[in-house]
Amino acid sequence: MFNSIGVICKPNDFTSQKTALELGVLLKDLGVILLEDQKDFEKNADLIIVVGGDGTILNTARTYVDFNIPILGVNLGRLGFLADVSVDSMTPVVSAVLNGEFIKEKRSLLSCQIEQNGKVLSKHLAFNEVVIHRNETPRMIEFELNVDGDFVNNQRADGIIVTTPTGSTAYALSSGGPIMHPSTNAICLVSISPHTMSHRPFILDGESEVLITLLDCEDRATISFDAQSSVHASEGVALRVKQHENFVHLIHPKGYDYFEIIRSKLHWGQKV
């Protein structure tokens, strides 16, 4: 099933590079074609194995989502939300995956568009979340929120998070947002320290289109994508967000249990 495999490691990380080399030897021993050049991934890769962590998977997912290439994550540290194969279990898990023993799961991304005066300034993708937030200043920003062309409200806050179900356990969770199962077809809006206490996280249908227009921020706002890239934003700039047309396909070991990962990462059931 997976005959040609590409391996991506965490940039400038010795341990990741060393593990990737060991993985390459294993793949060749298993009779798999190992793609050496990432330029070949788009046309020839049946599977991409990421050796690093969730951050490396976020970047890989955004890069290759439109090429429908499944991704398997090997985590160098503790169990990750996305990279759920440990280095110690890498050999048996990869061998099992190549024998067809795996679980395949699709995850949604956000397609984001920065606009001003009716013009598109830039386009971006986000796997976890896109965030409009104030810069290093004590003053809040003000923005107008519309969903599917309908006015929702004006808000004064430190910012707002638009999250996928995958990102619901990231920044949105620490801001009081709900945990959404990855299979949920939804987008969630989470205000960051809103001035009005009645603001609560808002779960929308996954097909919704969100438009956030900055009203009062002067030069105090930034729009960030998965906390890995960002653009400066000023008054009149608008962020248009909707679910991306293609999905990321994650490969998990057989026996993968999402709730076990949640329990482990969030320390549920442990004595304080």
Image (cartoon, rainbow, N blue to C red):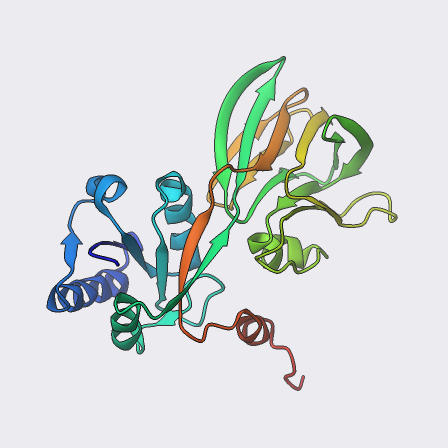
**Quarter of the rendering occupied by the N terminus:** bottom left
Which residue is nearer to you in this view: 231 or 45? 45
Q: Position of residue 8 (x, y in %)?
A: 27, 53
Q: Position of residue 222 (x, y in %)?
A: 59, 34
At a point 17% along the width and 45% down the height, the residue shown is 37
- Image quadrant in which you'd find residue 143: top right
Q: Position of residue 184 (x, y in %)?
A: 62, 54
Report whether 89 appears left or right of 161. left
Residue 9 shows up from this direction = no
At a point 37% along the width and 48% down the height, the residue shown is 60
**Quarter of the rendering occupied by the C terminus:** bottom right
Which residue is nearer to you in this view: 124 or 254? 254
Q: Position of residue 94 (x, y in %)?
A: 27, 69
At a point 30% along the width and 78% down the height, the residue shown is 88
Which residue is nearer to you in this view: 39 or 248? 248
In this figure, what is the number of numbered marks?
A: 0
- Image quadrant in which you'd find residue 135: top right
Report whether 264 appears left or right of 268. left
At a point 24% along the width and 48% down the height, the residue shown is 45
Residue 41 shows up from this direction = yes
Most extreme residue toward the bottom is 271
Report whether 184 appears left or right of 198. left
Report whether 194 appears left or right of 51. right
